[in-house]
Image (cartoon, rainbow, N blue to C red):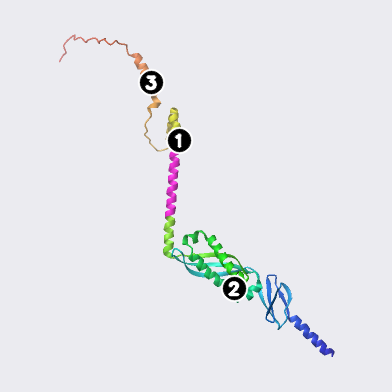
């Protein structure tokens, strides 16, 4: 009798021991007892009745799903290939198991179709310039569809946009033309600023006559400092204006004063010229 009792106790202990499971902190167990869904278990040590129950582990960590390249025709009829990456996590484990057969495969397929439909309504320039806006629209659209599956989409990032060769050449020419336009505008603005400064300098120098002489002497000094050069330049008459006025005054005082009716004495012939 004691042997039978010990055997029964051993079988019960073995049964109970075989039903023990350990779930990690990021894992949850979707628990079915006799085919019916029971409350989610975990984390830690749990008991799962053998034969009568079945459990499916679900990870709550963020998962990255690679969306393969998709052929997309944009609104402006440009054929491109675009791939993306989707970041998602299971928010409600029981919905992820009961609501959809394979939530990873279903989310990947939904991301592919959404990528084609959203980019098909977008122009090429908007896709290249406003990628953050496109990513936000993709995330919101996919997250709304996966909410019933217990899936939360945290981000969708467009990785690569493969353009046709002719489109790459056209964009390169456009970028080159834009750089040339900016260079010409910057050059014109520099010429305008230089002209304004020269006009201001001319106005200041015109108000002070001595300023032009000082500027002239400064220029002469700069030219003289150069080696192995011969420079021919005109001398402004204003530099000698004072000297010329003094010379004119002294010359006028040296000539004798004459009246209006005075005549010069006639020359007398004292003899005949000899041949």
Q: Name the residue rendered at 45%, 41% in the picture.
A: 193
Residue to which mark 2 is pinned? 104
Front residue (pair 30, 1):
30
Residue stretch rendered in magenta on the structure: 177-196
Front residue (pair 127, 243):
127
Badge 3 vs badge 2, beta-carbon distance below 8 Å: no
Q: Is residue 140 magenta?
A: no
Pick out the residue farthest to the left. 275
Seen in the picture, residue 178 relative to 99 is either above or below; the reply is above
Query: Does dot 3 land on a helix, a strand or a loop?
Result: helix
What quarter of the picture does the N terminus occupy? bottom right
Q: Main secondary structure of the magenta part?
A: helix
Q: Nearer the viewer, mark 1 or mark 3?
A: 1
Query: Does dot 2 land on a helix, a strand or a loop?
Result: helix
Residue to which mark 1 is pinned? 200
Q: Name the residue rendered at 78%, 83% in the picture.
A: 13
Q: Which mark is residue 245?
A: 3
């Amino acid at each position: 009798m004691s042997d039978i009792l010990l055997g029964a106790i051993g079988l019960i202990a073995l049964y109970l021991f075989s039903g023990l499971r350990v779930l990690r902190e990021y894992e949850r167990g979707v628990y079915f007892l006799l085919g019916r869904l029971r409350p989610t278990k975990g984390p830690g040590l749990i008991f799962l009745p053998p034969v009568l129950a079945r459990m499916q582990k679900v990870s709550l960590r963020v998962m990255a799903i690679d969306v393969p390249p998709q052929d997309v025709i944009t609104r402006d009829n440009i054929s491109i290939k675009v791939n993306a990456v989707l970041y998602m996590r299971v928010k409600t484990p029981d919905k992820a198991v009961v609501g959809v057969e394979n939530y990873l495969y279903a989310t990947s397929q939904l991301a592919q179709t959404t990528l084609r439909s959203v980019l098909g309504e977008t122009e090429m320039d908007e896709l290249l310039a406003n990628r953050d806006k496109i990513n936000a629209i993709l995330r919101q659209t996919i997250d709304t569809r996966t909410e019933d599956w217990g899936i939360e989409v945290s981000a969708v990032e467009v990785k690569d946009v493969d353009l046709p060769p002719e489109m790459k050449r056209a964009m390169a020419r456009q970028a080159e033309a834009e750089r040339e336009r900016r260079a010409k505008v910057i050059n014109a603005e520099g010429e305008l600023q230089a002209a304004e400064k020269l006009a201001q300098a001319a106005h200041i120098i015109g108000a002070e006559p001595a300023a032009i002489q000082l500027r002239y002497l400064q220029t002469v000094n700069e030219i003289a400092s150069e080696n192995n050069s011969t420079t021919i330049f005109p001398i402004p008459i204003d530099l000698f204006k004072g000297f010329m006025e003094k010379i004119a005054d002294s010359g006028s005082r040296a000539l004798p004063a004459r009246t209006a009716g005075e005549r010069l004495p006639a020359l007398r012939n004292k003899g005949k010229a000899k041949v």
